[in-house]
Amino acid sequence: MNRKWGYAALALLAAALLYYFTAGKAKVIEEMRSEVHQQLSIMAQQGFKIESVRKAKDQEHIELLFDDPQKVAAFFQTQGILITPADASMLRGLKIAVDLHYLPDTAHAVAADIYPITLPRSLTENAKDDQKKKLIAQLQEMLKRKVILLHLNVSKTGSSFNGSMKDINETLQTQKAMQITMQGFTFDGDVDQGRLKEMRENLKQLIIHDSEGLKMTMEGVHTDYIMTGKTPYDYTLDYTIEKVVIAKKQKLKMQMHDIHVDSLSHNQNGLLYPEAEAVAQTLSFTAQNRTVALEDILMEVKADHLDIQALEILQNTPETNQDTIEKALKQLLSKGVVFEIPKFSIARIRKENQTLQGLTMHAKFKIDKGFDPAAARRSPLAVLDKIDAEMDIALSNDLFAMIAQQPQSMMMLMLFPPQDQGDKKRYIIKLQNGKLILNGKSVM
């Protein structure tokens, strides 16, 4: 949520300052102030309520209220920020303060401190019991101290920006005390013709630790978001994370190291084509002083022919409106949707003093244009002929042998033995014309 209102503020300020100024400082400040107020007038018609504007010589205080979720979501999307009305409705009642400083130095046209001053209604209206009321009171006190504060600098050309978020070290008094520590969040980016073009973010460390001993740590996060087209669905998003650790006292621990994710999405004639590749050097699990580590993990995923209009309807329709949901699902699947995992692999598995070679897998799932979600809900078996699926999985011999030693696996492996391919055991599973086929033999 914080990231989305931060993006909106960035888009607002950068779009209002797209010119290079050389005139006298006072004149330039008035010109910039005029540009900002023109943008505020536009925003007042786009779901925001401008509640307070106070001026000083080279400074200004502005307060923005998120008032109309539908209009706010539409405004964000014109700025290249993908947010649904459902997301925006969670922000209704949120008030953001912006403290502007015109010409703060020779390099920047404007600097701004951006911070929330009221909580959204989605939080305050649901605070019924004493514990929730106590938490709301604590959050409101944090707002007074400007615990959540984003600092932004916009270049004199209005084409680039940079900034940071104030470090956080707070303990929330929920049913169990929760300490949140965030350090070293910085960002920079570029604006093109009033729209966010690229944004890069860095986070040194985030730690969430509760009083029952559950602790989550994330370190060394770097992201790069680039708009590649005219819609919010045209982008690339790449990020890396140096380390993620989730631990429950000294009993359980999960660790991931050197995670890299490259993803992209593009909109072609109203259809969405997303894909992503994720790589992790290690993923380990520790319980009762025993550790199992998966090494060199790779996963590729992609989807084709996703109807964007239907996706947006599904995102914005309450679960109680089943008729609208079923119509949108039918529209979504009417283009012949394809989901695919081109490759999933684990190079090695280390278990105590044993090293096993891993596995590889490919899977593809195609839904016929005539698939009827309502018929599937009534009788799932009746629509199996509208689905084609295939999965090809190959396990190393030593990994297969370890699985075969498990009592719960023995009967299944006896009934459905794998193909023997030298140093691998292979299963090819297909669903075609309503029939399930395993290694060339019909199962049902």
Image (cartoon, rainbow, N blue to C red):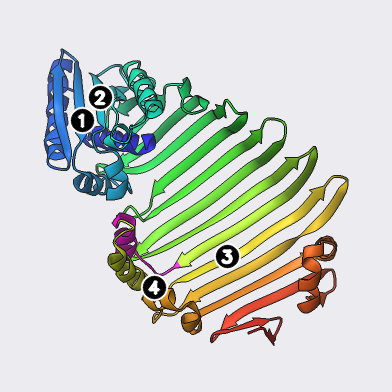
Instruction: Point out the frontmost of discs 2 and 4.
Output: 4
Mark 3 neighbour density, 10 Å: few (under 14) some (14–19) many (20 or more): some
Q: Amino acid at mark 1?
A: Leu
- Report helix, strand or loop for mark 2: strand
Q: Is residue 306 magenta?
A: yes
Instruction: Point out the frontmost of discs 1 and 2.
Output: 1
> Where, quadrant-wise, is the N terminus in this rendering?
top left
**Residue on which disc 3 sits:** 341
Q: Are marks 4 and 3 in contact (CB under 8 Å)?
A: no
Residue plotted at (23% across, 37% down): 15
Residue plotted at (13% across, 39% down): 42
Image location of residue 330, percent across then percent down = 35, 73
Q: Earlier in the sequence, mark 3 or mark 2?
A: 2
Q: Is residue 297 visible?
A: yes
Q: Earlier in the sequence, mark 3 or mark 1?
A: 1
Image location of residue 263, percent across then percent down = 49, 53
Query: How far is mark 2 from mark 4, CA to CA?
Result: 44 Å
Span shown in magenta: 304-317
Q: Earlier in the sequence, mark 2 or mark 4?
A: 2
Residue plotted at (30% across, 70% down): 327
Q: Amino acid at mark 4?
A: Leu
Which SS type dominates the magenta stretch?
helix
Q: Which mark is residue 333?
A: 4
**Residue on which disc 1 sits:** 64
Q: Which mark is residue 98?
A: 2
Residue plotted at (48% across, 77% down): 380
Query: How far is mark 1 from mark 2, CA to CA?
Result: 8 Å
Q: Which mark is residue 257?
A: none
